[in-house]
Image (tube, rainbow, N blue to C red):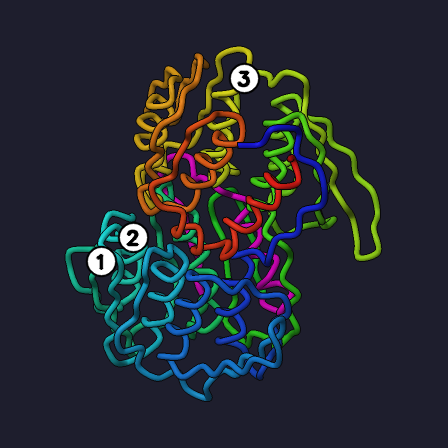
């Protein structure tokens, strides 16, 4: 627990989302390329290992730079370990559909509940052989009949279904036209990220109308990718300033591939003051926490990864809050809506799960065990509440290695600084 407001500078490693896309695009490129600042964590290590199964080579130049050499011809993926990484689970089956040999996908027990059926159905519609039922474990095999074309799918469960098809799209002989045919799709900024990274490599990609993307066939150019810091993780650290009335500064790149404005806007909605400045290496964001945290009514469909931290801040607010637009997070690392309702209620709040979010009524908080459900974002939420609530104990903090390997050390530095 922090005994005074947290202050200082926060530095976080590279973006998981950007690192995963950089590795995939480098693996499919027409020549070796370099990735600088890639995240080294469980999810990205699993991505590297999986791509190596297809014949991709990774050579670490130092702790911050890696050269990715694509194979002249993709080989069989063999057995791919997904862990609990949605990026591996979803980005690599379309690559497996380019290979005329079977690739078997397996993962952690909890990963079997993560939705992937719409993506696998789309690959089957394109001519790939996909085992049923459409959940882990499953097998994908491509062949000459898999040429691309137009495919429809319901991506309301995850924007990663669309990103996965777009990333591999240029390698299909006829390219791909991807059409979303379902309810509202979440996390649209992540599809924008995918599109911008493809276009930066010379790939022809257009969106002629909402919910439709057209990828032209052709080479994926080799580039040097500079991975941004992970702004969702950075915002999680900045939330400590909001919770304690402190002041924290972190790198916050302009024209980011990530939903930077949306994440900063969530902190502002709770009453934080945002101030931008220019440092030696680029733009900085300083967040100063309010005297009292405001209740909010937020639609987080575009920034749903931040829901657990937003919910934790809502527990500290001076009035009720509502979080909407995040029904799909029931299919993340765990059912985050159910887990947040249970764990926040267990610390004294009144939390009602909704079909697409949460209603949160703050009450006097007390300590207790906060279960993380092997979910790094749940651990972040519990740690945040623990800053201002005596006696909060996380049952497992090791799950944070998924995207932020030294989260305990970074968090401890905030607490120690507050003392």
Up/down of 81 relative to 101, above or below: above
User: Residue 317 location, x and y as percent?
Assistant: 54, 17
Q: Residue at x 42, y 59 (%)?
A: 164
Q: Which of the two residues, 79 or 278, is positioned nearer the viewer here?
A: 278
Q: Write down the residue under mark 2.
A: 116
Q: Residue at x 40, y 62 (%)?
A: 91
The picture quadrant where one finds residue 142 is bottom left
Q: Is residue 47 left or right of residue 243?
A: left
Q: Write down the residue under mark 3.
A: 317
Helix, strand or loop at mark 2: loop
Q: Residue at x 52, y 20 (%)?
A: 316
Label for residue 136? Answer: 1
Q: Which of the two residues, 313 or 166, is positioned nearer the viewer here?
A: 313
Are discs 2 and 1 less than 8 Å apart at CB?
Answer: yes
Q: Is residue 407 left or right of residue 197?
A: left
User: Residue 32 location, x and y as percent?
Assistant: 58, 83
């Amino acid at each position: 627990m922090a005994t005074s407001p947290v202050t200082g500078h926060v530095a976080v490693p590279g973006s998981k989302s950007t690192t995963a896309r950089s590795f995939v695009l480098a693996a499919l490129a027409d020549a070796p390329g370099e990735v600088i600042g890639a995240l080294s964590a469980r999810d990205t290590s699993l991505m590297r290992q999986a791509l190596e199964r297809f014949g991709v080579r990774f050579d670490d130049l130092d702790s911050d730079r890696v050269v990715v050499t694509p194979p002249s011809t993709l080989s069989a993926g063999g057995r791919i370990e997904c862990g609990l990484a949605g990026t591996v689970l979803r980005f690599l089956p379309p690559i497996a559909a380019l290979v005329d040999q079977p690739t078997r996908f397996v993962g952690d027990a909890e990963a079997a509940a993560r939705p992937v059926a719409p993506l696998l159905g789309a690959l089957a519609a394109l001519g790939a052989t996909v085992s049923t039922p459409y959940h882990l474990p499953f097998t994908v095999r491509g062949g000459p009949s898999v040429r691309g074309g137009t495919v429809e799918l319901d991506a309301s469960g995850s924007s990663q279904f669309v990103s996965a098809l777009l990333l591999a799209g240029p390698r299909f002989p006829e390219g791909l036209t991807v059409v979303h045919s379902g309810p509202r799709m979440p996390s649209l900024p992540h599809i924008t990220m995918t599109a911008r990274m493809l276009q930066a490599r010379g790939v022809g990609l257009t969106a002629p109308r909402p919910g439709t993307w057209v990828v032209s066939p052709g080479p994926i150019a080799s580039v040097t990718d500079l991975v941004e810091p992970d702004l969702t993780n950075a915002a999680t650290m900045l939330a400590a300033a909001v919770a304690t009335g402190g002041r924290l500064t972190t790198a916050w790149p302009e024209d980011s591939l990530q939903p930077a404005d949306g994440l900063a806007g969530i902190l502002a909605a709770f009453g934080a003051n945002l101030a931008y400045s220019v440092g030696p290496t680029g733009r900085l964001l300083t967040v100063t926490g309010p005297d009292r945290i405001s209740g909010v009514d937020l639609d987080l469909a575009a920034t749903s990864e931040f829901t657990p931290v937003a919910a934790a801040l809502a527990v500290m607010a001076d009035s009720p809050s509502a979080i909407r637009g995040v029904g799909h997070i029931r299919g993340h690392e765990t059912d985050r809506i159910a887990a947040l309702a249970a764990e926040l209620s267990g610390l004294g709040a009144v939390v009602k799960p909704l079909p697409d979010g949460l209603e949160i009524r703050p009450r006097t908080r007390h300590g207790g065990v906060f279960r993380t459900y092997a979910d790094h974002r749940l651990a972040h939420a519990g740690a945040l509440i623990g800053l201002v609530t005596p006696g909060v104990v996380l049952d497992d903090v090791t799950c944070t290695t998924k995207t932020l390997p030294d989260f305990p050390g970074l968090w401890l530095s905030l607490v120690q600084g507050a003392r």
